[in-house]
Every structure is written in C-alpha cells, then in structure tokens.
Amino acid sequence: MLNFTVGPVMSSEAVRKIGGEQTPYFRNDEFSKIMFENEELMKEFLFASDDSRVVFITGSGTAAMEATVMNVFNEEDKVLIVNGGGFGQRFVDLCNIHNIPNDEIKLDFGQDITQEILDSYNDKGYTGFLVNICETSSCVYYNLDLISNFCSKNNIFLVVDAISSFLANPLNMVEQNIDVVITGSQKALACPPGISVIALGQNALKRIESNSCNSLYFDLKNMLRNGERGQTPFTPAVTILLQINQRLKEIKEQGGVNSEIERISNLANDFRNRIQKLPLEIKCTCLGNSVTGVYCINSSAIVIVDALKKEYGIWVNPNGGEIGNKMFRVGHIGNLTIEDNDKLIEAFQDLEKRGILK
Amino acid sequence: MLNFTVGPVMSSEAVRKIGGEQTPYFRNDEFSKIMFENEELMKEFLFASDDSRVVFITGSGTAAMEATVMNVFNEEDKVLIVNGGGFGQRFVDLCNIHNIPNDEIKLDFGQDITQEILDSYNDKGYTGFLVNICETSSCVYYNLDLISNFCSKNNIFLVVDAISSFLANPLNMVEQNIDVVITGSQKALACPPGISVIALGQNALKRIESNSCNSLYFDLKNMLRNGERGQTPFTPAVTILLQINQRLKEIKEQGGVNSEIERISNLANDFRNRIQKLPLEIKCTCLGNSVTGVYCINSSAIVIVDALKKEYGIWVNPNGGEIGNKMFRVGHIGNLTIEDNDKLIEAFQDLEKRGILK
C-alpha cells in the first residue's frame, strides 16, 4: 500500500531494517549513547538552547500532551488554548481534568488565528498558552509568529504541540520564544508509533522542578533525572528509539532540518498544484506543509477514500464526523516522493474518467 | 547477541518480519479485526470469563500498573500490597500518589508469602490486594493459590501483575478468582517493548464503570468504549500490536498456553540442573519459570555479566543496587532453546576454566 495518511507514515528502508532486528538489552552505555544522540539531534532540529532538555515518553502524542499539562502548569495558572478542532479540544479536556484554569479561543473549523483575535486577550493575566500548531483535524497551520509575538509581549509561557508539523514547517524554540515543543514518532519522524517527545526550555525546566506531578508514569522530573544518564525510568519502546536515532541521523546526513522541511514543502506544493485540474477543492488558506485538506465537489469523500484503498492500493486519511463525507486529508510526510504523488494524481484522474470522481 | 535478560527478549522470525514492514493505517476494519483477535486470544490464555475485557495500552508495564490503580480503586478502598522488592514498592508508590489507603506486607528480598503471614491480615476490612506475582527484582514467584484463597475468603478484589510471568507460569482468572491481570509485550509475549495489557473481569469492569479517573490517557472507561469497535482512543503502537497478534497465533498453533508454559518450564529446569556443577548458587526456593536468580560464590557478578557480554556475546540481566555484585538474573522467556542454554553453560564452563568464575 502507498500511504498518504498523516500517520503512521511510511519509513525508510534503514528504519524498517531496525524494526526487523532483535530488540537489544538497553540498561547499558550503548543504549544511553543512542539516547544522548537523540536528545542532541532533537535539540539541534528544534533550534533549542543548549540548556534545554528532551524527554522521550513511551506513549502516543496525547501522553506527551497530558504529561506536559500536568508538569508545567498548576491550579495557579491561567492558560489560553486555541481550540479550532479535535486536538485543541483535547488540550481543553486535559486542562479541565487537571484543574488548570483555562479559557478557549474558539475558532471555526479551518479558521486561522489573527492579530485582532489575539489582541483581545492582551493584559488579561494569562500565564500559559497551548496550541496545536497544525490542527491536524482541519489541516490548519496556525500563524506561529503571531502567537509567539503575543506570548512574548504578554510574558506568557508557550507550549506548541508540533506533533504533525515538526520537520515539515519551520520552528525555532529560541527565536520564537517557545518553552515546550511536543512531537511524536509516527509523523514526519517517520518511525512506527509508540514514542512521543517533549522538548523543554529553561523556563519549562524551572516550572517542572518547582511543581509536583500526581503521576508516576508522567512525572517529567523523574524522566529528566534518568535522562541525565541516557536512560528512562521504565522500559521504553527500545526499538522505536533506535529507529528514531537512525532517522535523525539520516536527516542530518541529508542536509539537516531545513532540507527536510524543503523536501516536504515541495511534495505538498506539487500535490496542491496538480489537483487544481481535478474536481477537488482546497478551501483552507492557511495550510502547513504536512497535510492538505481536500474537498470533493460533486462526489462523496467516503467513496473516494474507499476506492483509492481498494482499487488503487492507496491510503489517504478520511475525516471523522459530519465533514467525513465532504473532505479527506492527504499527508505529505514520511518516505514519499514526487513519483508517489504521480501515482495518487493518476488514480484521481482515473476515478474522474470512470465518473466516480466528479 | 544471545539474550537471556528478562526483557526485552528475543522474538521469533515471523514477529521480527512484521517489525521490518511498513506500519499500516489503522483506523479501519482490518486493524479492528486484529485487535478483536488479540483480545480473544488473551482471554483464552488467561482463562478469563466470557464477559471479561482486555485493553492494550501504549506504554510500559508501569503505565498499566498506574492505570489499574487509578481506575479500579479510590479513596474509600483499603488495599494490601505484597512488597518484597522494587516492583512491590512501585505499587506502594502508585497507591500513595493516587491517595489509595494501603498497607504493605513487607517481605525480605527473596522471601515467599506464607499462610501464616496472610492469616494475620484476615478480617481487617481490606477491599483490594496487589501483587507482582513474579517479583522480577528478586526472582521470587509468590504462591498465587495461597493469595487467591486468602482474597476469596475475605472477599478482596485481587490484582495480579503478571508482567514477567504470563505464559511462563499457570494462571487462571476464573478458577483463581483474579479480577485484574497485567502483562507487557516484551516479556514472554516476546515482542518489542511498548505495549502493556490489562485483562479485566466483571468485578473490575463494574468498579471502573462507577469510578472516575483523573487522567485522559489512562482512562480505562474510554479505552473499553473504543475497544468495543476494536480501536484505541489514541494512536497506539500499531506495529507492536500486529506483532502481538502474530505471537498469540503462534502460541495457539503450537498447542496453546499450557504448551508454552511447559516449554519455558523445561528451559528453566534444564538451566537450573546444569549450573549445579558450577560455582554458582540458586538461593531462592520459590522461583517461577521466567527467571533464575544466580549467586556467584567466589566471583563478582558484575565481572561475570560483563565477561559474558563482551567475550561470549551473551546478555544476562544484571541486578541493581548492592546485590548487583553478588547476583545476576537469567531469563528463560523469549525465543530461546535448549541449544541456547548449551551456549550459556559452555560460556560459564570456559569462564571457570579461565579462573574468572570461581
């Protein structure tokens, strides 16, 4: 199958090879060395400060979101959450579960944040800001510079969930004053799912140190302490961490994070240009590079997704809920090439010829 | 490397092959079918009642321990915890973090539970019992029948962490009145680490339904609801779940859970018989089949572990803390054979000949 979903995505041959090997014993210096390399390369690719730290949690992206909310905030905070879809709502739910006072910036499905919206929240005593920078449910990529400026001006602690956008869109922790970045193994890192990653700047580390965490598994203090010797408190998904190591080194060898962003951006632009001649529509004007929301003009998105899978061996990402019959999503992350785009476009053209896509 | 650690352990060729393939898209019927099969086979191998349920958490065994404590108990419970090592202490820590009133049955390192000890806790109003049935730090396998009878007699809800003993020692949820069993992917399930498993009987399901859980990621109600359609609330470690499916089917084809227990038991007995002629000692009189604690008589355990690794390409499991220089552990789970035992014994014999093992 050719996989254009937003994750899990396709992995390189070298990454897959590691998945096919025996899992090594990990409570030793060899594995610690891998973990130190992973931490350093993540910091490099996130343009994090030297004194930043990175932890790797065995769990989904939501595990990292929950660990972040539990460890960097407490009941004395007042956080602002961009809620324009399923993942924004998840941050709201997490804050409510953990008694973090919060307000939502409610946005319509597909709507970007604006200066005007942000200005209305100036000087209101907010201490934290949570945003899923690519709201993967709607494919919106929020304007990170606007958010970053707003937070800097108001001295607000900024948490960016970049789960589906890390390596696909530019992000600079130091220049953009980002305190926490969250990502996951199965997006542009292009490894199997099972590991989520949290990068923590100095302010985040200070908050964690002075906070208490009502969980053993999600206790970032404990993870950071174990990380000092390149280890984790509990048995991690060792194989996936080895695969992440391989992948981070591949990116480095192929020119680093900017080359990878350019590569993904080229794939996204190529796809977006080429579907203009098809009865498909891109409505969102603020897309990132990871994923394109595609609307069907006169056909059912469910039928198209199903036909691509069963008749052409291609997975694209269906949408849940009511929008699912109108829109599907095409990812541009993972081990994809322009030739793969050719195959997808040819499948659409064939579906049009057959009167299924109209 | 030949891996005799207690996990991650060696996987079969078919399990590894899946690890080397692309991760498939999972929000579809094909993956749900796999998950339903996993649940059914787990229930079969645990001799669970038909109305039991099984959930798969992306996380280490500790994640499943924490989710269990948070979902089946609350502040009105009074639980008794067998604490004879690092993993018993972990249950104590988890109960303290989540405000579950608890008392410990403190046992010495390597000591089994007895009828006498248990009798002293009769009629004391306990509502829950937590035990790591194989305390993997000391290699003790606690007497499950004694514990089961004690809990039945006192009408106590019984949670068995069988992380390292599932498939290695007999366990029958119905006959032994076990309400919850916890296990993990990287022990006798012989898959890479990253998935932990919780099997829940009817009493456990009732407790979860009437309880509230202060976590999104660990909310078992949410997992159970999603599991009804063969799915998980958040992106799981898909590859490992496919590998678990392969492995469960392999066990079934090879004669089922009892055959697998017999196979592991034979490996353990073979090893234990053959080290009698070596300057090594087994002190524990209540071992299970998963792992053997081995004491060095006149040599340093650290030196032996290191020599096995560097000079013979064999991993055995070092112990942490003060005991680490006296004792190491040899696992019998994973894709091991009698021929692998030969290699380990030959390495010991060679170390003895060279005057290193004495």
Image (tube, coloured by chain):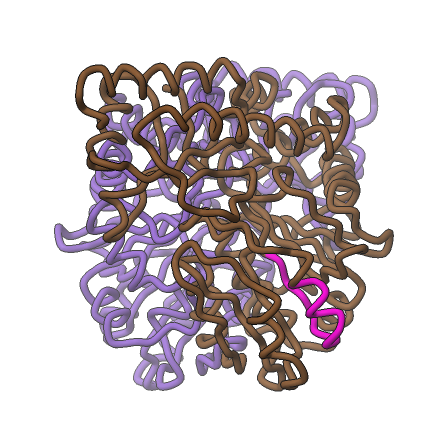
Chain colours: A brown, B purple
Quadrant of the frame with the N terminus of chain A: top left
**With A22 as the anchor, is B158 left or right in this view?**
left
Outermost residue, right direction? Answer: A50
In the figure, residue B213 lies in which quadrant?
A: bottom left
The part of the chain drawn in magenta is A147-160
Picture coordinates of residue B350, whole percent (x, y): 74, 17
In the image, residue B69 sits, relative to residue B183, either above or below, namely below
In the rendered view, tell whether residue B296 sits above or below residue A128.
Answer: above
Q: Nearer the viewer, residue B134 or A294?
A: A294
Residue at (35% x, 27% y) in the render: A315
Query: For the C terminus of chain A, which image quadrant?
Result: top left
Residue drawn at x 57%, y 64% as measured from the top left: A114
Q: Is residue B60 visible?
A: no
Q: Does B81 appear in magenta?
A: no
Which residue is rendered at x = 56% and y = 56% of the image? A64
Q: Position of residue A220 (x, y in %)?
A: 65, 62
Is A308 left or right of A179, judged from the image as shown? left
User: Looking at this rendering, what residue extends furthest in the left direction?
Assistant: B50
Tell which of A290 and B195 is nearer to you. Answer: A290
Q: Is residue B279 visible?
A: yes
What number of labels is visible? 0
Q: Is residue A153 magenta?
A: yes
In the rendered view, would you say B309 is above or below B111? above
Front residue of this view, candidates A103 and B110: A103
Expressed as whole percent of the image width and height from the top left, the position of residue A117 reads 55, 71
Residue at (46, 30) in percent of width and height: B269
Residue B157 on image: x %, y %:
29, 70
